[in-house]
Amino acid sequence: MSAPGSTSTREPSVRLAVGDFFPSLTASLVNGGHINLPADVSDGWAVLLFYRGHWCPYCRKQLDDFQNRLDRFREADIRVVALSADPEDEANLTVEQHGIDFPVAYDLDPATARGTLGTYVGADEAFIQATGFVLGPDGRTTLAVYSSGAVGRLAAADVLGFIEYARAQE
């Protein structure tokens, strides 16, 4: 048996590079409904945070970081979405315990995420390792951060600065 949090040794089918269109993905949202990516965020810039699960302290810290700066993201017209393989009840706990006020999707299939997005997955494909994407208004990937373990992920202040810089180059 692998250690908790260890990464699957299988290579992903693809990793998204800068300029790649984000593939279509539909997921259920906490509090009802679905999100269709990238279509539902194609009206502007977006940050997609794939987190390991409610149980992960590093993920909770990252989600808190984005929640604490959510007003700045909204002022800059940047959408934030979090996604995980958590079942609905655990995703609900994440939202409730951390006061998350941006969309949180749940029940993603780690094997599908590995195959379509190139994410690393945990042992026995039980969860998706921390992965972050910044999408431009055209649905193209402008930044992709893949972590193979608990650490190494997008930080809210860095993303805000990155998008501010990218907008200045347009």
Image: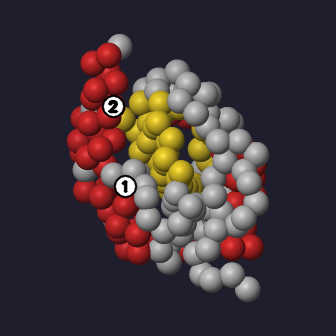
Q: Secondary structure at mark 1?
A: loop
As measured in the structure, the alpha-carbon distance from the residue carrying label 1 to the one carrying label 2 is: 21 Å
Q: Is residue 129 left or right of residue 72?
A: right
Q: In terms of depth relative to the viewer, which is nearer, 16 or 83?
A: 16
* Res 163 label: 2
Query: Which residue is at 23% across, 41% downward?
Result: 72
Q: How many marks?
A: 2
Q: Secondary structure at mark 2?
A: helix
Query: Which residue is at 72% across, 64% downward?
Result: 9
Can residue 73 be seen from the camera position used here? no
Query: Which residue is at 42% across, 30% downward?
Result: 45
Residue 63 higher or lower than 90, as above or below: above
Q: Which residue is mark 1?
A: 101
> Tag 1: Cα neighbours inside 10 Å, few (<14), some, or many (≥20)?
some
N-terminal of the pair, mark 1 or mark 2, is 1
Q: In terms of depth relative to the viewer, which is nearer, 42 or 119?
A: 119
* Res 157 label: none
Residue 91 at x, y percent in the picture: 53, 68
Quarter of the image with the N terminus is bottom right
Task: Name the amino acid type tagged 2.
Answer: Ile
